[in-house]
Amino acid sequence: MFVLLTLATSACFVDFDQSYSFSQGSFVCSFYTCFFQFALLCSAFCFFYISKEFVGIKKIVNFEYDLIIVFSILGLTLINACDDFLTLYLAIELQSLCFYALATFNKNSEYCAEAGVKYFVLGAFSSGLLLFGFTLFYAPFGTISFEYIERTNSLVHCLVAFFGCLFFSTAILFKLGSFPFHM
């Protein structure tokens, strides 16, 4: 409750429209990205605190488990801060590779190995769809930056951009394992 009250009072003094771009426009820092990164890091801290008991029960003493989780959180924070399609793709792949490794973390189970291979093959397929969707976005606009695409309001009139959005949405649903793309 204290955190929510602090955020609510600080919202009165923050300019929501102000954002800063760095790394040649690949990443952006605004109030919303900082807020969601703070929420993500708080969730990660709670996850590590809660998962201590699970790690003790499963006898996971490998340092790789914590390292994979940290890299996955790094990928999620990069997804939150990216401002173009290339950094979005690289951040999604960093996060996905960590999840592939976590799916096969139990080396003694054949189900985990099978799930990891299926997840990897479907992830590779969805990465191809994602890249194809990005190229369909690049074709009509000539840029990979979210900011420049947002400034041109011709998205509703372009059929190629519509199909790019369709491929992008399908690939993201594959990555998330949503219905009807789940296994």
Image: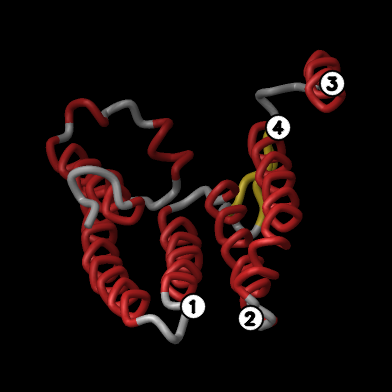
Reply above or below: 96 against 145. below
Q: Residue at x 49, y 78 (%)?
A: 105
Q: Amino acid at mark 3?
A: Ser
Decide which of tag 3 and tag 1 comes sooner along the chain: 3
Q: Earlier in the sequence, mark 2 or mark 1?
A: 2
Query: Residue visible at 72% across and 62% down?
Result: 52
Which residue position is annotated with label 2?
64
The residue under label 1 is 105
Viewer-nearest of discs 4 and 2: 2
Residue 10 tag number: 3
Q: Quadrant of the N terminus?
A: top right
Q: Which secondary structure, mark 3? A: helix
Q: Quadrant of residue 117?
A: bottom left
What residue is pinned by disc 4?
A: 31
Label 2: element kind: helix
Q: Amino acid at mark 1?
A: Phe
Q: CA distance from mark 4 to mark 2?
A: 33 Å
